[in-house]
Image (cartoon, grey):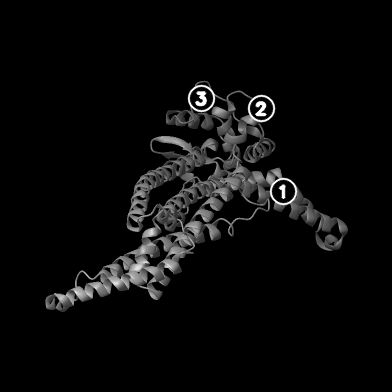
Amino acid sequence: MKENCSNGNPGNPEDDAETEYANFQGNVSNMLTMGTLIFGFCATGTFLSIQFTGDEQWSNVGRLVKFVRFGMYSAISSLTATVIVFVFSTRASRQHSQYSARAAVRTAERSTVFFVLAEILLYFSLYEFMNSVQTYSKMEYVGPKVCPINAFEFSSCSQTGIDFYNAAKSFCGPAAPAIAGCVDDDYYDPSLGECLLQALQAAPRPATNLGFFFSCTALDYIAVSKWGNGSSADTDFVYFAWDRDESGYETVVKLLGDGFEQDPESKEQPGFRPDDEAYFATIQVLGNAFCKKPSTETAMQQLCNGSSAATAACAQARIADMMAGDCAGKKADDALKCAKVCAWLEDADTYASVKTIMRGALDTWISRILWLIIVVMIARSIAGSIQVVNSCKTLVKDARSPLAIAFAFDIFGLLDTWEGHRRKKDDDYEDEVEASDSHGE
């Protein structure tokens, strides 16, 4: 007996209950943290960061509906799990403070059903949260449906290419004729590059004006390659000017040879491409040509010269020139947007559009995460079901009555006060009996 006292009374039921209660509250803390984090992500990311005004870059409203639905399911599930865990944490804490650690542990044991439910709800919340992440990523990163690959000649980028092509026809005159055996039926075949270069060298454009040279040689390139294989339909040129590969800017630059000096400082910039100058010059020149910027500028200079600068005709000419400048700037912006959204890249030995690559990456990795959550949720559901059955059996055995199962479903703790008070009397009586037996020994 003295040895037991000197060692801190090992085997004391109250000490064991304190340890179990501390473990229970540690689990509660983890689940509360998980639930509140997921709910916070959903509340701020789903319901506060997204607006539906009609000015968004995404065009698939169905994805927006799915995104909100997934976010709502995730938020409701995580909030429900958090409330369940918080209720039992409060109940156990109150039992501990009012009665004893053993009373708090009994409340924790009776919470098995609801803790298993809360855990499954957290897994389901994670699953729906990842679904919302996948949907949001497709909305924001895959981009709007503006590419010819999505809507053919009726997309906005198709119309941009056709506008540039029509402007080039008026600005440059007839394009170079196609040469037999030099048509790019498979425009991924690099062996045709030399053939196309020779075709362009057979009818060179004057290089005295680089803007004219770049724009008109790009027209010649696309005329003798795949998209100009004898067809006269304007819809064959939907990629013209804004698509770097289809417009052959690298080949266009090669035609200048050593006479084209690149800025040495620009070569040192990250992402430098030798055809950058040809690309930007083309979309600027053809944008000006499409919007009649040279004509409005000439008219403004003529009507606003000297004493005529204050006339109404001069004011109208200035307005027309400003509108033409805005139009040309918008065309250049459209070309840059189409070049980014509709670009094609090499990825894992394949050549695909940026949209296809990003959609594939999102579907692959997020799908794996979703399957992992499903497997964990199923496994934990089975384990939790076994734990619930064993817990119910223990309750019935301890109370010697099937009505004891009612305590396992008392989520609000309506029976806590009565049960805690009765159990405290029983525990005190057992402690007195043990104490008297110890003294008797």
Q: Position of residue 295 (x, y in %)?
A: 75, 47
Given the image, on which type of amino acid does mark 1 rest?
Answer: Pro
Q: Which residue is mark 1?
A: 294
Residue 436 left/right relative to 345: left
Quarter occupied by the C terminus: bottom left
In the rendered image, the vertical position of residue 222 relative to residue 390, given as above or below:
above
Q: CA distance from mark 1 to mark 2?
A: 27 Å
Query: Mark 3 or 2 closer to N-term?
Result: 3
Could you tell me which residue is drawn at 49 percent across and 51 percent down?
129
**Residue drawn where x is 41% and y is 39% of the image:** 347
At label 2, counting other C-alpha atoms closer than 10 Å, the crowd grade (few under 14, some 14-19, many 20 or more) is few
Which secondary structure lies at badge 3?
loop
Name, please, the residue furthest toward the left. Answer: 3
The residue at 87%/58% (across/down) is: 312
Closest to the observer: 15 or 153? 15
Name the one closer to the observer, 285 or 339.
Answer: 339
Residue 371 falls in image quadrant: top left
For the image, the number of numbered tags is 3
Seen at 38% across and 45% down, the residue is 372
Is there CB contact under 8 Å for labels 3 and 2? no
Q: Which residue is mark 3?
A: 185
Instruction: Check disc 1: other Cα within 10 Å, few if <14, some if 14-19, many if 20+.
Output: some
Q: Residue 272 appears at what percent x and percent y?
A: 45, 51
Tag 2 residue: 233
